Structure formats: structure tokens, C-alpha cells
Image: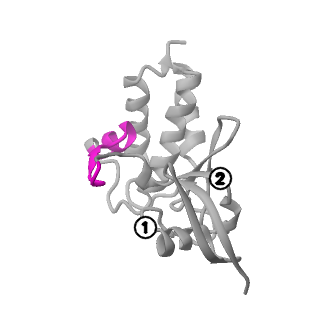
């Protein structure tokens, strides 16, 4: 098995790792090489989306990418955000403030076991960012939330709390217009 260096931007910091196996899944790279264990290995087949990270593209768009079925070297040269990259931190690395989605999920008890929470946080964060560029009309809100979160699997809450918390954040941030 061949190894090669991997360079990427991870949660805003340049990372240069040497000798990463060519066939190493990104989730294993995050856990074993970067000690970022927030992304969860759920199904291992790309179905549940507990493992997703956000990739920020050069054109200003962002997307979810499943790390259990995507090799680490796919991310070479890319800007990647994990669940650990959303909260604000002080100089010592201590969390000082959660992002609006994280905070609302906590406030509304959106999760039970929290295994799927990182994927839902990433998806809902992307939705907030998308709607900050172009708000949604109220009549389309439920479909937009379903399109963004519906492919994530949760075995505990039945999705109602995740969807409700996301809806409340979008409304509170003024990202939903009448219509």
C-alpha cells in the first residue's frame, strides 16, 4: 500500500500530514491523525450521513461530503470544516460560544444519543449559510428543510426536534420571508 503526503485546510488551519495511506478513508484520517472524533462512523456505507464534513469550494459554495466512503486524499488542497470547527474558541481552545444551530439543538434537546448530531449540525449549518445568501419564502420552508436534512438518519428522535430547531433558527435569523 502506497503512502503520500496530504495537505488541506482543516477548520481554518493549514494541515500538512506526511505518509498517509492512499486508501485511508477520511473519517479514519480525522480520528487517527488529527484527533477530531466528532464525525461519527455510523453505517460505513455512506447512507446515514453521521460522518459528513463540510467542504468549502473555491466558488463560494459549500457541500456535505461523506467521510466514511471518501478517501482522505480526495480532500487534498480543499477547505474542510468538521463539527469541531463550528464553535468559537478562546486562545486555549476552550469553547466560548456554539454556532446558532449547535446552540438551538442543545436548547431544544434536538438529539438523544447524539450519534447523528454532527451530521445534522453540518447540514443545518449549510442550510443557514445558503439562506443567508438567498432567504426562503415561508411556503417553501418545510420542503427546504426536508431537502437539507432528510437524507440524514437518526434512530432516536424521529427527526421532529432537529427539523423544529432548524426551523426556529432560520426564522430567528430572519432567513424566512412571507409568501
Residues tagged 2 and 1 counted as in contact (Cβ below 8 A)? no
Which of marks 1 and 2 precedes in the sequence? 1
Question: Could you tell me if residue 158 is visible in this image?
Answer: no
Residue 69 location, x and y as percent?
66, 68
Judged by depth in the image, the label closer to the viewer, 2 or 1, is 2
Residue 72 vs residue 153, the one in the foreground: 72
The residue that label 2 is drawn on is: 78
Quadrant for residue 169, please give it. top left
Q: Quadrant of residue 70?
A: bottom right
- Residue 141, image x and y in percent? 53, 27
Query: Badge 1 local density, few (<14 within 10 Å), some, or many (20+)?
Result: some
Q: Residue furthest top?
A: 179
| SS at mark 2 in the image | loop
Classify 15 as above or below 41. above
Q: Which range is magenta? A: 91-106
Residue at x-position 51% and y-position 69%:
42
Is residue 3 shown in magenta?
no
Task: Label 1, secondary structure: give it.
Answer: loop
Residue 7 visible in the snapshot: yes
Q: Quadrant of the C terminus?
A: top right
Magenta span includes 92: yes
**Whole-percent x and y of residue 4?**
69, 75
Q: CA distance from mark 2 to mark 1?
A: 19 Å
**Where is mark 1, residue-wise?**
37
Q: Which of the two residues, 165 or 22, is positioned nearer the viewer here?
A: 22
Q: What residue lies at 54% left-to-right and 74% top-to-bottom?
A: 28
Amino acid at each position: 500500500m502506497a503512502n503520500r503526503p496530504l495537505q488541506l485546510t482543516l477548520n481554518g488551519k493549514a494541515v500538512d500530514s506526511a505518509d498517509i495511506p492512499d486508501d485511508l478513508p477520511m473519517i479514519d484520517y480525522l480520528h487517527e491523525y488529527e484527533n477530531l472524533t466528532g464525525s461519527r462512523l455510523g453505517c460505513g456505507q455512506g447512507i446515514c450521513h453521521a460522518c459528513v464534513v463540510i467542504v468549502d469550494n473555491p466558488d463560494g459554495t459549500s457541500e456535505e461530503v461523506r467521510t466514511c466512503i471518501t478517501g482522505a486524499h480526495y480532500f487534498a488542497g480543499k477547505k474542510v470544516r468538521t463539527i469541531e470547527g463550528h464553535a468559537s474558541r478562546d486562545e486555549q481552545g476552550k469553547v466560548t460560544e456554539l454556532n446558532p444551530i449547535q446552540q438551538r439543538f442543545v436548547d431544544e434537546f434536538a438529539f438523544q444519543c447524539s450519534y447523528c448530531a454532527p451530521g445534522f449540525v453540518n447540514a443545518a449549518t449549510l442550510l443557514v449559510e445558503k439562506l443567508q445568501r438567498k432567504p426562503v419564502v415561508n411556503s417553501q420552508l418545510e420542503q427546504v428543510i426536508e431537502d437539507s436534512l432528510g437524507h440524514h438518519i437518526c434512530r432516536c428522535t424521529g427527526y421532529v426536534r432537529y427539523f423544529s430547531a432548524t426551523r426556529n433558527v432560520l426564522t430567528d435569523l430572519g432567513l424566512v420571508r412571507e409568501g
